[in-house]
Image (cartoon, rainbow, N blue to C red):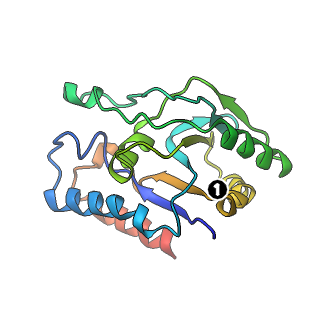
């Protein structure tokens, strides 16, 4: 049995728990996709490794807390956005395994015992696993965002898939917040998605 590695969109900010004025059909579509994610897996994962687009560090850095707090890494939203909770346990043993696999591939890494779940993790996970009963570990991106470095990280971590760890990349393929609500940005976003899928 092999778990997949999935890139998923986590939506904007604290959606769908706070009304952001988004198209209701888009909100329903993304929420439906995330809710259906567990049923599409080959088995219930023992843990989830989330590579979150909202954490960059000089070297890939893994969260090691057994009980990660919340990290509200957004601003300007209604008060409700800062009361959301996803109290899933961490998975220190999986975090150690991540570092061991990276080290075996010659990739330097680090760990962070205090970082909480950021919204690239807790928002999609609140929809997909609302019971917060699957242990979760976060992994940062490497500063500089070099594609080759991240492909090497992915290759190094692929054995986790055979250890019943689900690997999720959480982000958006297009994330230009200055033009996020600008209809003229659609052409740029579609061109990038076409390139990405090619």
Does 160 sit left or right of 16 as displayed? right
Q: Position of residue 126 (x, y in %)?
A: 35, 45
Identified at 20% across, 39% down, the residue is 18
Q: Quadrant of the N terminus?
A: bottom right
Q: Label 1: how many residues lie within 10 Å, few (<14), some (14-19) or many (20+)?
A: few
Q: Position of residue 165 (x, y in %)?
A: 61, 55
Identified at 14% across, 57% down, the residue is 24
Looking at the image, is 47 positioned above or below residue 119?
A: below
Does 17 sit left or right of 65 as displayed? left
**Which quadrant of the figure has residue 119?**
top left
**Which quadrant of the figure has residue 133?**
top left
Foreground of the two, 164 or 95: 164
Q: Position of residue 136 (x, y in %)?
A: 53, 43
Report which residue position mark 1 lands on: 147
Foreground of the two, 116 or 20: 116
Query: Residue 36: in sight, yes or no?
Result: yes
């Amino acid at each position: 049995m092999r778990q997949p590695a999935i890139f998923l969109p986590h939506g904007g900010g604290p959606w769908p728990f706070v009304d952001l004025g988004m198209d209701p059909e888009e909100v329903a579509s993304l929420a439906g996709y995330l809710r259906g994610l567990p049923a599409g897996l080959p088995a219930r994962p023992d843990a989830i490794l989330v590579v979150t687009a909202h954490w960059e560090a000089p070297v890939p850095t893994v969260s090691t807390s057994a009980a990660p707090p919340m990290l509200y890494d957004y601003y300007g939203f209604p008060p409700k956005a800062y009361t959301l909770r996803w109290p899933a346990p961490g998975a220190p043993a999986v975090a150690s395994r991540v570092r061991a696999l990276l080290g075996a591939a010659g990739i330097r890494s680090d760990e962070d015992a205090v970082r909480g779940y950021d919204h690239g993790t807790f928002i999609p996970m609140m929809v997909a696993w609302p019971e917060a009963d699957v242990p979760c570990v976060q992994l940062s991106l490497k500063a500089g965002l070099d594609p080759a470095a991240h492909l090497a990280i992915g290759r190094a971590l692929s054995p986790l898939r055979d250890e019943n760890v689900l690997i999720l990349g959480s982000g958006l393929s297009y994330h230009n917040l200055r033009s996020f609500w600008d209809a003229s940005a659609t052409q740029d976003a579609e061109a990038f998605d076409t390139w990405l899928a090619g």
